[in-house]
Image (spheres, grey):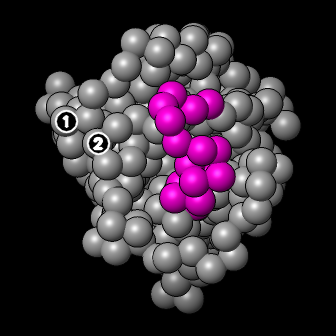
Amino acid sequence: MVATGKGASQGVLIKGGNALEKAHKVAMVAFDKTGTLTMGKPVVVSAVLFSGFSMVEFCNVTVAAEANSEHPIAKSIVEHAKKLSQKHGSFAKHLEEAKDFQVHPGEGVSGKINDKIVLVGNKRLMLAYSVPISHEAEDYITETEKLARTCVLVAIDGKVAGAFAVTDPVKPEAGRVISFLHSMGISSIMVTGDNWATAIAIARELGIKKVFAETDPLGKAEKIKELQMKGTTVAMVGDGINDSPALVAADVGMAIGAGTDVAIEAADIVLIKSNVEDVITAIDLSRKTMSRIRLNYFWALGYNILAMPIAAGILFPFTGIRLPPWLAGACMAASSLCVVCSSLLLQSYKKPLQVL
C-alpha cells in the first residue's frame, strides 16, 4: 500500500500488488518505438508523386482515407496533405467519406473513395494487395529508411501514386534509460511494426542490440511469449492499440500515460507523465519494496521466535521471571508497530539519481 501510493506520487500508477511483485523480477524490457522511444509526434518532411496523378487529387484521397485513423503518423499525414493541397490548388472541404474503411494493424488503412480503391500504408500493405512497386518508389523507400524515417505509400486503384517521408524524433531521455537499465542488469529490445531499416537506425542510436521490426500486434505478443518460454521475465512498454496484445502477454505491461485508452486498460502499470524514465522508477520501486518486505518478514519471524517462548514462561523455572498478559500483548503490538514503521520508511523513496 505504501509503495503503490508512493509510486502514484512519482508518476507511476501501479494496478495492484501482483504487478508490483512481478516488476522486481524483470530481466528484459521490450519497447515499442513510435510514441514510446520516440516523441510520438511524427512530422512529414517530404512528399513525392510517382505517377500521372495531380498533387491535389493525391492529397485529397490521402486525407479522406486517413481521416478515420487514430495513428499518430496518420494524423501528421492528414495535416501535411491539407497544407500541400492548398499550396498546389484548393483543398476539397467536403470530401467523400471512405467506404469499406479498414484498418490493417501494423500495415496501414484501406478504403474506397470516389469508386477508387485507396491504400495508405507501408510496403507490406502494398504487397498484400498485389500492388507493384516501381524502381523509383523502391529507391525513395530505401533513401527514406536510411535516414531513419518512415515511408508511407499511397496507392490508387492498384498503382502507387506517391509517398510521404515521416520522421519522429527520439525522446531525449531514451538513451539514458536504456543505458541505466543495462547497469541494473536488465536487457532491452525493440518490438515495432515499423520497417527494419528505420527500426535498426533508431535502435543503434539508443544502444539497443536486439530488434524485431515489421511486426503486427499479434506478432508482438508472440515475440513476448517466445522470450518468456526461455525463462525470461519480460516487461513490455507501449502506448498504442497495436501494443495491447503484447502488454497483456508480458509479465508486466507498462503503458505510456499519453497513449490510447485500450493500452492503458491492458497494462499493469501506467506511466502517468509519459516519461520513459519512469520505467526505471517502477522497477526500482518494486525492488526496494520487495527488499523491505523481506526485511519485515525476517524481523517479525526472528522477534516472534525469541518473544513467544518468553511469553509462554520459558524463563520462569530458571529466573522466576514471568511476563504478565498485558506486557505480552504489548510486546506483540510492538512487533506489528515496528513492521508498519519499517514499511512507512518507503515514503522516503527517491528516484535513482542517475535518471533525475
Residue visible at 46% across and 77% down in the picture? 97
Quadrant containing the C terminus is top right
> Residue 99 location in percent, x, y?
34, 74
Q: Do the residues labelled 1 and 2 touch (CB within 8 Å)?
A: yes
- Residue placed most toward the observer, 317 or 145: 145
- The magenta-colored residue range is 48-63
Of discs 1 and 2, which sits in the foreground? 2
Of the residues shown, which amino acid type is indicated by label 1?
A: Ser
Residue farthest front in this picture: 52
CA distance for labels 1 and 2 = 8 Å
- On the image, numbered disc 1 is attached to which residue? 130
Q: What residue type is labelled 2?
A: Gly
Q: Is residue 57 highlighted in magenta?
A: yes
Q: Mark 2 points at which residue?
A: 158
Looking at the image, residue 184 sits to the left or right of residue 229; the answer is right
Q: In this picture, is 30 found above or below 91?
A: above
User: From the image, which quarter does the N terminus lie in?
Assistant: bottom right
- The foreground one among 209 and 123 is 123
* Residue furthest to the left: 229
